[in-house]
Image (tube, grey):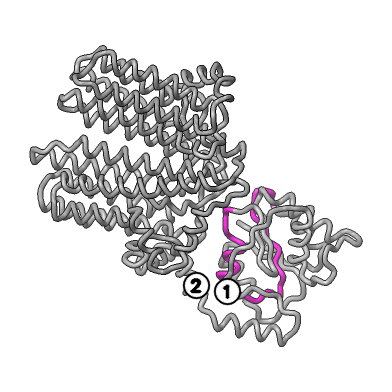
């Protein structure tokens, strides 16, 4: 239970107490500032507490935005301030200053809640102030002002504002015009029945898995049903985020579930299409694995670029200025959002192609579309990085190092290469990472299965990987290092499995890449939730990217093709078990602050 402390002169007929109770607050009335401080001290430290001026006039949703958002330790709107447990100490100090002799920080400010906010600002404490837009939140000074404020409240439908704000301000064309116009009402229906975003996220996953099962039947009816269910799953996928924004039910666990389930749904559907094609005598597992690799590498580019520039200083570029200018022209906004093939457009394309064509055609179109989108977005980000003059921080460098997923072998060699790496030019890290990956893939692609060449390539790859991360990743293009690592590791698994030419090798490779990709996505969302990277023991246990690559190439060299297929399966299961158990343990028990992920454009 949260507690709201009402201060100031009560207003007869005010609905404020009822509004606060409807938001889950236990309301207590303070006679004066000293009484408010006493009541504040009586509230348990692990509970949310709010100080609200009794004269407050405003929309219920303004109060909801200001007093119930779980993402911020301290938040305020005019006439009200709230603190979660993490912000209680700062709120208590500010209250004590207002109650001390001569402690007022703003004599002209009549509201105790507003004076507390001024004191918090004076202390340099971060206080979240939500954007209210047309919503009203005020503390009228006289009856006339109060009547004007009430009229302003009556003139704006806060439920309409609430529904509109439930939809992301930036989304793809298909989502904006084909899904959100009605999914927001589904979100409201869910909220009124007490459903949570995580429950809707789970329903979306189940629907997508059923769609994958329908695709796996290999029949035309199954393909049509799969396409319809995939769209239904996407509707629910939009609904869960809209429900979170509508009801302010944000959580780190929810953001993680939403993000990882999106990938699980899409990649499970790829597997379903491959199984369905196999029933019809067409082996498209290599295409399915290629689509998963391409899509995952696209996401890693997004993640790495964003983390590298998360808090960069002097972060300007002519390319970024041109992009902003194009975003001000209506038609270019939608064209640029569509050509990157965001999740809405991508899933709609997959659903339609599944229903009317074959899995092979679906994968061909998907690969071409994603390759074009990846080229477009990556080229734009390279141009931005080369033309902006930014100084990247230690935090950004650490995030890129965590995303690199270097194991004991690369980390050990990196220490030996530290002095040499410091003398290399700024472009060295991504150039060396790319070179090592190309050598690895080139040698692994040599004719015939087995042999030592892939192992030699893996050794070279391990050495170049260590050199690439031997110094802090603060260069203009160092954000390309993790994507190059992902492409090399996943690509060599695809090559070796395809060259095995035995039943089960490519599906086993699909499972291994899916398990490793889950680990990489999990790393991203831990970093985004300010929870840090996965523990070092986990990275060591699964070998790091260079260790897994070396192991896979050695297995291909010493085992027969059929034995290699079995080994890939065992390795996939082992990696999946380790990363899933640790990931679930962390996210279920994590004390990380609540967040909400708005999703990636890709």
Q: What residue is at 16 percent from the left and 25 percent from the top? A: 501
x and y percentages locating residue 366 in the rendered image: 25, 48
x and y percentages locating residue 593 in the rendered image: 57, 46
Q: Disc 2 or 1, which lies upstream in sequence?
A: 1
Q: Is residue 186 visible?
A: no
Q: Which residues are magenta?
A: 44-71
x and y percentages locating residue 335 in the rendered image: 35, 62
Q: Which element type, helix, strand or loop, lies under badge 1?
A: loop
Residue ranking furthest to the right: 101
Provide the residue designation for mark 1. 135
Label 2 close to label 1 by CB (< 8 Å)? yes
In terms of image quadrants, where is residue 396?
Answer: top right
277 horizontally vs 350: left or right: left
355 horizontally vs 463: left or right: left
In terms of image quadrants, where is residue 16?
Answer: bottom right
Provide the residue designation for mark 2. 161
* CA distance separating discs 2 and 1: 8 Å
Residue ranking furthest to the left: 281
64 drawn magenta: yes
Seen in the picture, residue 476 relative to 121 is either above or below; the reply is above
């Amino acid at each position: 239970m949260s507690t709201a402390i009402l201060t100031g002169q009560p207003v007869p007929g005010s609905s404020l107490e009822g509004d606060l109770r409807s938001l889950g607050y236990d309301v207590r009335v303070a006679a004066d500032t000293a009484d408010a401080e006493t009541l504040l001290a009586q509230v348990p430290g692990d509970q949310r507490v709010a100080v609200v001026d009794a004269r407050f006039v405003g929309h219920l949703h303004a109060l909801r935005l200001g007093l119930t958002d779980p993402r911020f330790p301290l938040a305020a709107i005019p006439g009200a301030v709230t603190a979660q447990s993490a912000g209680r100490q700062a709120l208590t100090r500010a209250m004590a200053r207002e109650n001390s002799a001569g402690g007022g920080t703003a004599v002209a400010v009549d509201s105790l809640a507003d004076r507390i906010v001024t004191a918090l600002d004076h202390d340099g404490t971060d206080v979240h102030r939500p954007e209210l837009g047309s919503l009203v939140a005020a503390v009228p000074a006289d009856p006339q002002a109060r009547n004007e404020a009430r009229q302003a409240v009556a003139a704006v439908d806060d439920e309409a504002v609430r529904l509109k704000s439930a939809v992301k301000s930036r989304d793809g064309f298909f989502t904006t015009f084909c899904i959100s116009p009605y999914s927001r009402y589904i979100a409201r229906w869910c909220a009124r029945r007490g459903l949570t975003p995580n429950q809707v996220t789970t329903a979306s996953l189940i629907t997508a898995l059923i769609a994958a099962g329908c695709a796996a039947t290999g029949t035309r009816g199954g393909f049509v049903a799969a396409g319809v269910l995939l769209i239904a799953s996407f509707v629910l996928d939009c609904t869960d985020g809209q429900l979170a924004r509508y009801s302010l039910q944000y959580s780190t666990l929810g953001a993680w579930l939403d993000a990882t389930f999106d990938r699980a749904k899409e990649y499970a559907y790829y597997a379903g299409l491959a199984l369905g094609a196999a029933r019809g005598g067409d082996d498209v597992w290599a295409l399915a694995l290629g689509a998963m690799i391409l899509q995952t590498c696209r996401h890693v580019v997004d993640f790495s670029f964003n983390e590298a520039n998360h808090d960069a200083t002097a972060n300007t570029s002519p390319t970024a200025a041109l992009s902003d200018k194009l975003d001000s022209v209506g038609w270019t906004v939608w064209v640029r959002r569509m050509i990157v093939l965001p999740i809405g457009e991508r899933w709609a394309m997959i659903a339609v192609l599944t229903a009317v064509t074959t899995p092979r055609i679906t994968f061909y179109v998907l690969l071409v579309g994603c390759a074009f989108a990846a080229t477009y977005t990556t080229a734009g980000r390279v141009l931005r990085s080369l033309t902006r003059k930014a100084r990247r921080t230690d935090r950004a460098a650490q995030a890129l190092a965590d995303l690199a997923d270097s194991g004991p072998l690369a980390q050990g060699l990196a220490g030996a290469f530290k002095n040499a790496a410091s003398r290399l030019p700024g472009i060295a890290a991504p150039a060396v990472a790319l070179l090592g990956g190309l050598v690895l893939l080139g040698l692994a692609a040599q004719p015939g299965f087995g042999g030592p060449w892939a192992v030699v390539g893996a050794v070279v790859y391990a050495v170049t990987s260590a050199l690439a991360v031997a110094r802090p990743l603060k260069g203009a293009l160092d954000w390309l290092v993790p994507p190059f690592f992902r492409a090399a590791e996943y690509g060599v698994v695809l090559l070796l499995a395809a060259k095995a030419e035995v039943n089960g090798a490519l599906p086993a490779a699909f499972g291994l890449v899916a398990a490793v990709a889950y680990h990489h996505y999990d790393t991203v969302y831990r970093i985004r939730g300010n929870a840090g990277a996965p523990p070092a023991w986990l990275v060591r246990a699964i070998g790091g990217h260079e260790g897994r690559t070396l192991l896979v190439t050695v297995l291909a060299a010493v085992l027969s093709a059929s034995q290699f297929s079995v080994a890939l399966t065992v390795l996939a299961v082992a990696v999946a078990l380790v990363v899933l158990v640790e990931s679930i343990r962390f996210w279920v028990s994590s004390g990380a602050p609540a967040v909400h992920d708005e999703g990636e454009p890709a």
